[in-house]
Image: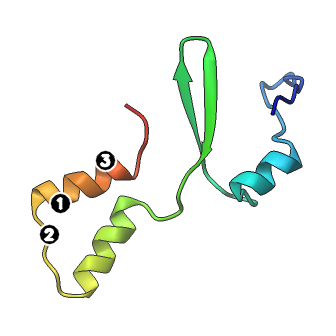
Amino acid sequence: MEIIRDVGEKGQVVIPIDIRILLGLKNKSKVVFEVKGNEVKIKSKKEENWLKQFLRYQKKGKSLTLKELKKIEEESYDLP
């Protein structure tokens, strides 16, 4: 699918409704911009970040190692 949009004077581009539906984007949703060369990939960002996940583990009485925390943090971002 290829859709062409104009860039506004403030550098903004509207994400078409078809794509917002496909990605499950709603008001205040987070998106990730991944730049490789002259291409940009836009992905939906999961709502749950590593801190929320960490706090959830703490509430359950589980302790996490530093290695486990790093893994959670790395999985929460798809950027290099």
Quarter-of-image position of residue 72: bottom left
| Place of residue 17 in the rendered image (x, y in percent of width and height, measured from the top left) | 87, 50
Tag 2 and tag 1, C-beta contact below 8 Å: yes
Q: Secondary structure at mark 1?
A: helix
Tell me if 73 is positioned left or right of 14 in this view.
left
Tag 3 and tag 2, C-beta contact below 8 Å: no
Judged from this view, the residue extending furthest toward the front is 1
- The residues tagged by marks 3 and 2 sit, at their Cα atoms, a distance apart of 15 Å
| Place of residue 57 in the rendered image (x, y in percent of width and height, measured from the top left) | 26, 78
Marker disc for residue 64:
2
Q: Quadrant of the N terminus?
A: top right
N-term mark: 3 or 1 = 1
N-term mark: 3 or 2 = 2
Marker disc for residue 74:
3
Residue placed most toward the observer, 45 or 52 = 45
Q: Residue at x 42, y 60 (%)?
A: 49
Marker disc for residue 31:
none
- The residues tagged by marks 2 and 1 sit, at their Cα atoms, a distance apart of 6 Å
- The residues tagged by marks 3 and 1 sit, at their Cα atoms, a distance apart of 10 Å
Q: Residue at x 72, y 56 (%)?
A: 25
- Residue 49 to residue 14: above or below: below
Tell me if 72 is positioned left or right of 1 in this view.
left
- Residue 58 to residue 20: above or below: below
- Which amino acid type is shown beneath numbered disc 3? Glu
Q: Secondary structure at mark 3?
A: helix
Q: Residues within 10 Å of mark 2 (few under 14, many from 20)?
A: few
The residue labelled by disc 1 is 68
| Place of residue 59 in the rendered image (x, y in percent of width and height, measured from the top left) | 27, 86
Q: Secondary structure at mark 2?
A: loop
- Residue 33 to residue 67: above or below: above
- Which amino acid type is shown beneath numbered disc 1? Glu
Q: Residue at x 88, y 27 (%)?
A: 5
